[in-house]
Image: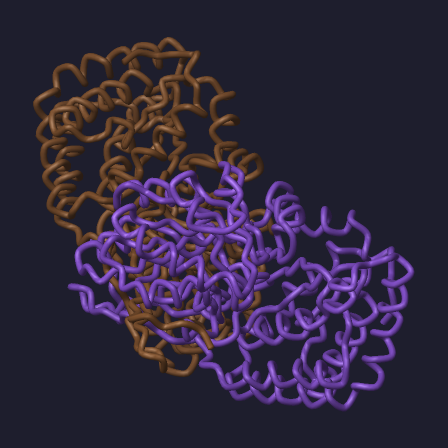
Chain colours: A brown, B purple
Amino acid sequence: MTENKNFDIAVAAGQAKAASRVVAQLTTAEKNALLTDIAAAIVADTAAILKENEKDISAGKEKGLSSAMLDRLLLTEQRVADIAEAIREIVTLTDPVGDIRNLALRPNGMQVGKMAIPLGVIAMIYEARPNVTAEAAALCIKSGNAVILRGGSEAIHSNLALAQCLHKVLQQRGIHQDIVTVIPDTSRGVIEDLLKQSQSIDLVIPRGGEGLIRYVTENSRIPVIQHFKGVCHLFIDKYADINKGVAILVNGKTQKPSACNALETLLVHQDIAGTFLPEAAKALSPARVKIHACELSRAYFDDAELATDDDYHAEYLAQEIAVKVVDSFDAAIGHINEFTSDHTEVIVSQDYSRAQQFVKRINSSVVMINASSRFSDGGQLGLGSEIGISTSKLHAYGPMGLEALTTEKFVVFGDGQIRE
Amino acid sequence: MTENKNFDIAVAAGQAKAASRVVAQLTTAEKNALLTDIAAAIVADTAAILKENEKDISAGKEKGLSSAMLDRLLLTEQRVADIAEAIREIVTLTDPVGDIRNLALRPNGMQVGKMAIPLGVIAMIYEARPNVTAEAAALCIKSGNAVILRGGSEAIHSNLALAQCLHKVLQQRGIHQDIVTVIPDTSRGVIEDLLKQSQSIDLVIPRGGEGLIRYVTENSRIPVIQHFKGVCHLFIDKYADINKGVAILVNGKTQKPSACNALETLLVHQDIAGTFLPEAAKALSPARVKIHACELSRAYFDDAELATDDDYHAEYLAQEIAVKVVDSFDAAIGHINEFTSDHTEVIVSQDYSRAQQFVKRINSSVVMINASSRFSDGGQLGLGSEIGISTSKLHAYGPMGLEALTTEKFVVFGDGQIRE
């Protein structure tokens, strides 16, 4: 398989739809055997995959990609082994397809329930990382979906090498090749065409920068599940346990600042600001966290800049945080509702009613009491591997596991009932 | 409230978003009391509502609306009482908001669950029927959502009269007026503007003809839940109980042919065609059902026309049906997968494995064994009142009750946990 600028996306989407009926009917045992074979084939093909990856790396260097970008693009023997291991972990996850929930008896004797079924065809549009290619394909297969993958042009050789490996296994097992399609055309126009295939594709999941996600959302005729950014708030209530608050602040901000579940804004109730903020300043200083503080909190930090509204909207993704003292519980709720990205918000409080109120009044996709925002992740919340995170409320909200790749149909078991 | 062509939809959507935070926090008891008051106010205001309805009726006659359209538009004392009764039934439904599901303990001691929350702001775009205005508003209020209603221009006076009645009750109870907005502008342009308010509106539900639904789907920047048409199939398997099959056929086709859950295509296994089709012909003849038959089945009916592919795509919504003899179980599945509208499909069979296979292999929104397609309805399936039916798989699939107007956020109850 090589790069191809004359790829017909409508034909490919139609073939993926036909293939989706095949993968939807595979048993869990069949899907697990297929994924186990794929993991083994990826390890066996390591040399070939690394050779193709080298082409992407040297093209990337020529184009002048940043070292961070090149690092995300780079595959090594260990990283290929990690991809295979991630697929083996997907084998261990519970398959939601076919479960019937809430089977209830109606007054006329019919049984009515809801059965989980695959969505059909899922299109993933993402940027440089080649591991997404294999892992997204594995999650879609496990949940009985066909998948169309359109990765960034920077990773095209790596992605096609992984696709070749997957197709070889599908062929060996005599399973419809078009369960997995890696689009060999890296032009922008192909995304535009892809987003029109609403007859064949059931869901589009874009992963990458805000520009890509906005482009997909604004141009798609197919439902999109998106996540623009994570501006996660931590509210230290007046009844907070200071030690828990400091630990959750430091963990949320500094453990992995590039993650979307890292903290970006700290709100502190005025009645506890005088005791909490000196501790916070001390705890954040070893990581040299840059502070953008309101007027009431600025004096507690060395070199803090005055925070603006832009700071309260900012997703720094760096060792940087906005700080604001609020005069009441309601003011904290009001600030979060105004600046929320609907990702993750945390309250630290020992007061039962206030903690419960926070959960009731904040409708972000993940709301936490006394825990680090860094747990806002499919694996940490118990979903297994995640295919993405949704900050829009339709279909899925928050981290998305296998279940978010299914829907439910009604099933009715009758014995000749007709309507009066 | 009167018709207004200078209505600012962006402002209204923003106000609805602010109001949505209020209605989301009402308790079930508060919402039920509000709805009970609204039902009473509608009955008390019957005279005023009928007076405004008369304006719509005479305008409709002047415009030359069909008698069927005028009948859907017409309100009478009884019909107003029925609207109030429908709202009282919504009071009796279980409120899904706030339920926490699957609260599970993680290895680090955190509890993680999913809490049902309202979607936020729901926009309904629909055609002439004024009862939709009151019932959709009631379903949205019960599920904690704000609602923006844009009914057809033919019903504008009736809709505004109902809105006035609702607003009076909201005012009396001191609740944010903008929980319910009836758009007083009936120009087409307002729909275009409405569909751009993705910052404020969470979901659009169009109800009406295929043209309206396609227009909304193609122009919306907001997620849309749609249902284009219902081409419901009945498959009489070779192991069918003939009596059950005939009863389900007659009920599905003739009980209410204008409904989207009426049967449109009958598939008959060739091994049973010779015994089933004469019975079917006899049973359908009193209702004078017009038959479009394949070559193999045509001889069983008087005056049957030869069926074309158009017939197998048709939603007749009339005493009319397409008939086809299939040579195998797989051919029946293949036909349905080719012509499905993803609404409702039924198998009649006494064979356990084939009945189960049908449920497994057909992924329409409602799949039935030995029961009439006419049960494919929110009330009949046990959801209570329905706000619509979805034949697209995202978020909701099939009849939509209160739960389809909610989503789930993750809630995490910690005690100071941080990520290692």
Relative depth, front residue between A111 and B215: A111
Asked if one can make out residue A214 in the rendered structure from this viewpoint, the answer is: yes
Instruction: Name the residue: 83% across, 86% down.
Output: B47
Q: Position of residue A105 (x, y in %)?
A: 30, 77
Locate residue A131: give its quadrant. Answer: top left
Q: Nearer the viewer, residue A191 or A261?
A: A191
Q: Position of residue B27 (x, y in %)?
A: 51, 83
**Number of callouts in the render?**
0
Please state the horizontal and vertical placement of residue B75, each as a whole percent of the image: 76, 77
Residue B408 visible in the shown view:
no
Dividing the picture into quarters, in which one does residue B131 lie?
bottom right
Residue drawn at the location 45% of the way across and 69% of the way down: B403
**Relative depth, front residue between A377 and A186:** A186
Relative to B259, is B193 on the left or the right?
A: right
Q: Residue at x 17, y 56 (%)?
A: B353
Q: Residue at x 66, y 72 (%)?
A: B179
Using the image, determine if residue B113 lies above or below residue B362.
Answer: below
A199 is higher (above) or lower (below) than B136 = above
| Image coords of residue A88 (percent x, y) | 12, 40
Q: Quadrant of the N terminus of chain A?
A: top left
Q: Is residue A108 left or right of residue B133?
A: left
Name the image quarter holding residue B50.
bottom right
Residue B339 lies left or right of residue B141; in this view the side is left
Report the side of B184 relative to A123 (left or right): right
Q: Is residue A362 above or below residue B206?
A: below
